[in-house]
Amino acid sequence: MARNLDAKCRQCRREGEKLFLKGEKCFTDKCAIERRNYPPGQHGQKSSRLSGYGVQLREKQKVRRIYGLLERQFRKVYHTADQMKGITGESLLQLLESRLDTVAYRMGFGSSRTEARQIVRHNGIRVNGRRVNTPSFQCRPGDVIEVAEKAKNQLRIKGAAEAAEGRGFPEWLEVDAKALKGKFKARPQRSELPSTINESLVVELYSK
């Protein structure tokens, strides 16, 4: 399986904001953005003005990195969103948030999307009582997602669940952190998703 092996903190610095790729480290003063909030590389501290295309490209790269997808995977999700009824940008974010790895992360079964994806691939997650090891699996409203019995004793999962419970869960999820089980109630509305994402720029880029 192809993966993005770029250093996580460099990706955040490249986009100039926290993408929450390193789990709990992102919530501490050890976060790279807290220390060096400028792009990586020899010329990172030099200011540069982006063109309209450059702004669109950076926004697409940011969203792609947040959800941990390669370009081909991300474009496939976009084309699916483009064929759906409604606003393409909103549909894109809903599809990304409905991925099993993202749902598992939002429920606190992993400290980061990367860790949640690994747990999914290692048969650590069940959907409606059935084992699912495909990170891109699309959850539907009403689906019950839980940690498999054999994985419930893993300290990293317990720790991630406790930390997530302390921060609170999204409105579109119903989670029992102690039982490591939750329900995907509905696809999130745009108002419930981060305002730092400008999905219209992504749509403009791919519409060219």
Image: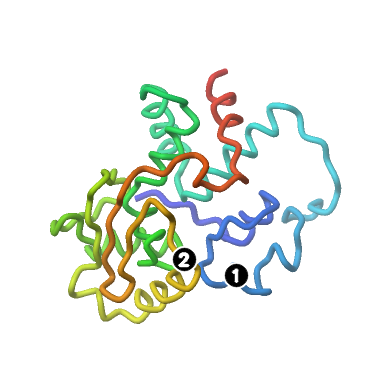
In which image quadrant can residue 31 be found? Answer: bottom right
For the residue labelled by badge 1, is the local secondary structure a helix, a strand or a loop?
helix
Residue nearer the viewer, 84 or 150: 84
Residue at horizontal 23%, vertical 55%? 133
Residue 112 locus on image (x, y percent): 46, 63
Residue nearer the viewer, 64 or 97: 97
Q: Which residue is mark 2?
A: 168
Dot 2: few (<14), some (14–19), or many (≥20) neighbours within 10 Å? few
| Mark 2 or 1, nearer chain start | 1
Residue 36 locus on image (x, y percent): 76, 63
Residue at horizontal 30%, vertical 69%? 176
In which image quadrant can residue 188 be found? Answer: top left
Quadrant containing the C terminus is: top right
Query: What's the mark number on residue 1?
Result: none
Q: Nearer the viewer, mark 2 or mark 1?
A: 2
Residue 136 locus on image (x, y percent): 32, 46
CA separation in Å, label 2 and label 1: 14 Å
Residue at horizontal 61%, vertical 30%? 201
In the displayed structure, does residue 156 sit left or right of residue 166?
A: left
Q: Residue furthest right?
A: 46
In the displayed structure, does residue 181 sit left or right of residue 117?
A: left
Give above or below for 96 relative to 133: above
Q: Which residue is mark 1?
A: 27
Q: Amino acid at mark 2?
A: Gly
Count all numbered tags in the image, as a single digit: 2
Give above or below for 165 relative to 61: below
Residue at horizontal 41%, vertical 78%? 159
